[in-house]
């Protein structure tokens, strides 16, 4: 971290600031130039608060040269993390396909979709029991009844289940869920992230609608810092000025995250596309970019879905996508786990 001092800062104030910085376990290289005086902070600066430095009255600017996340950082953890999700491995060398409806609507609907996606080769079953909807008048999910149906679908198909949590108060109800999803809207729900850090549950952390990759990694850091190493990141499209698609799939997130972090990365082309026909081309780009898996919305009757029908594949479309995905994943040297 580089701290640029104000030219008018008194020696006394600078000395006091340096003392306070050193007390945080960081070394300082002091360099006085003709134009600027600079403090080079060396060591673990993740705990040094930029705002605190700026508020000191002696600091003109602060620039970070190393990332503010440590546990999510590949630099301190070069080997790829693999997460065990209900007996399936998610991460380097494997390919995961999490498929299922946006929301669990009924026993018949979930079981039909679960059996269809299993037959086509999906490795995990998704389904929202608690839905974060933009409108309070939209279907909010079957809640605990939806969780019970997911357990039943797991018992019948053997597929691990992935479902979204809305609050840390639900952790007990989610105790036997295989992968807990944190949705885009909750990516910065820090109380929830902290609570998930204290559990050991695998967490699928989705990128916020308008979040940077660094913010996504900082949210992952919250979970890791609590002692839970089982974090899977999910790019699901971000908001841009483009109106022709629901969200802009940021495919560059895959190579960037892979370079910066050791955590697995899954792509959700369904929420990015917003329309079913675009899911397959986006899924292809995800595999080519090096993603560790896909999350795809599948519904037995998309025109009558209670949530996200337009972007949902029907079982036949999913089956055809899976034939292509299997070939491409094998080409990339990834095994279906
Ligand atoms: C979902 O996966 O159904 C969902 C609500 O996704 P997101 O949080 O990415 O909008
Ligand atoms: Mn959805």
Image (cartoon, rainbow, N blue to C red):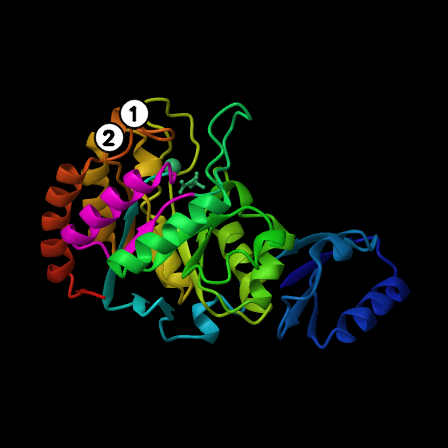
The N terminus lies in quadrant? bottom right
- Give how far across and how far down residue 32 sits, in percent: 72, 65
Which SS class for mark 2? loop
Residue 148, how many percent across, how many down?
43, 51
Relative depth, front residue between 183 and 66: 183
Q: Secondary structure at mark 1?
A: helix
Residue 328 visible: yes
Q: Is residue 306 above or below residue 110?
A: above
Q: Is residue 91 left or right of residue 73?
A: left
Q: In percent of the image, x 56 and y 72: which residue is there?
A: 227
Q: Is residue 119 left or right of residue 269?
A: left
Residue 213 location (% of width, % of height): 46, 50
Q: Is residue 290 left or right of residue 212?
A: left
Residue 108 inside the magenta-drawn segment: yes
Read off the residue under disc 1: 304
Q: Which quadrant does ligand 1 occupy? A: top left
Give the extent of the magenta segment. Answer: 103-128
246 relative position to 314: left or right: right
- Residue under numbered circle 2: 301
Relative to 54, residue 16 above or below? below
Is residue 255 visible to the viewer in this orientation of the structure? no
Per the model, the C-alpha gap separating discs 1 and 2 is 6 Å
- Tell me if label 1 and label 2 are in contact, CB under 8 Å: yes
Say above or below: 250 vs 148: above
The residue lying at 18 percent from left, 46 percent from top is: 116
Asked whether residue 164 is drawn in magenta, I would say no
**Figure check: 51 above or below 184:** below
Residue at image x 63%, y 53%? Answer: 169
């Amino acid at each position: 971290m580089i701290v640029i001092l104000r030219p008018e800062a008194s020696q006394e104030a600078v000395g006091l600031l340096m003392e306070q910085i050193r007390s945080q376990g960081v070394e300082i290289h002091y360099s006085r130039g003709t134009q600027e005086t600079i403090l080079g902070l060396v060591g673990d600066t993740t705990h040094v608060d930029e705002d605190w430095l700026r508020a000191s009255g002696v600091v003109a600017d602060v620039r970070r040269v190393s990332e503010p996340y440590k546990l999510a950082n590949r630099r301190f953890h070069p080997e790829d993390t693999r997460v065990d999700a209900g007996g399936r491995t998610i991460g380097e060398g494997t390919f995961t396909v999490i498929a299922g409806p946006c929301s669990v609507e009924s026993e018949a609907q979930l079981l039909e979709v679960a059996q269809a996606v299993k037959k086509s080769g999906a490795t995990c079953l998704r389904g929202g029991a608690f839905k974060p909807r933009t409108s309070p008048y939209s279907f909010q999910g079957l809640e605990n009844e939806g969780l019970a149906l997911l357990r039943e679908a797991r018992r019948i198909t053997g597929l691990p289940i992935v479902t979204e949590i809305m609050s840390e108060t639900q952790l007990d109800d989610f105790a036997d869920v295989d992968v807990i999803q944190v949705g885009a809207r909750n990516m910065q729900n820090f109380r929830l992230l902290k609570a998930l850090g204290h559990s050991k549950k695998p967490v699928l952390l989705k990128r916020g609608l308008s979040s940077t990759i660094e913010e996504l990694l900082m949210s992952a850091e919250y979970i890791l810092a609590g002692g839970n190493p089982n974090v899977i990141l999910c790019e699901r499209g971000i908001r841009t000025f483009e109106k022709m698609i629901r969200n802009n799939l940021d495919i560059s997130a895959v190579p960037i995250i892979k370079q910066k972090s050791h955590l697995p990365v899954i792509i959700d082309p369904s929420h990015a596309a917003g329309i079913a026909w675009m899911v397959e081309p986006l899924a292809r780009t995800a595999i080519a970019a090096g993603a560790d898996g896909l999350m795809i919305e599948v519904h037995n009757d998309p025109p009558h879905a209670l949530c996200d029908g337009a972007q949902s594949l029907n079982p036949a479309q999913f089956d055809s996508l899976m034939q292509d995905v299997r070939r491409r994943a094998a080409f990339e040297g990834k095994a279906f786990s």
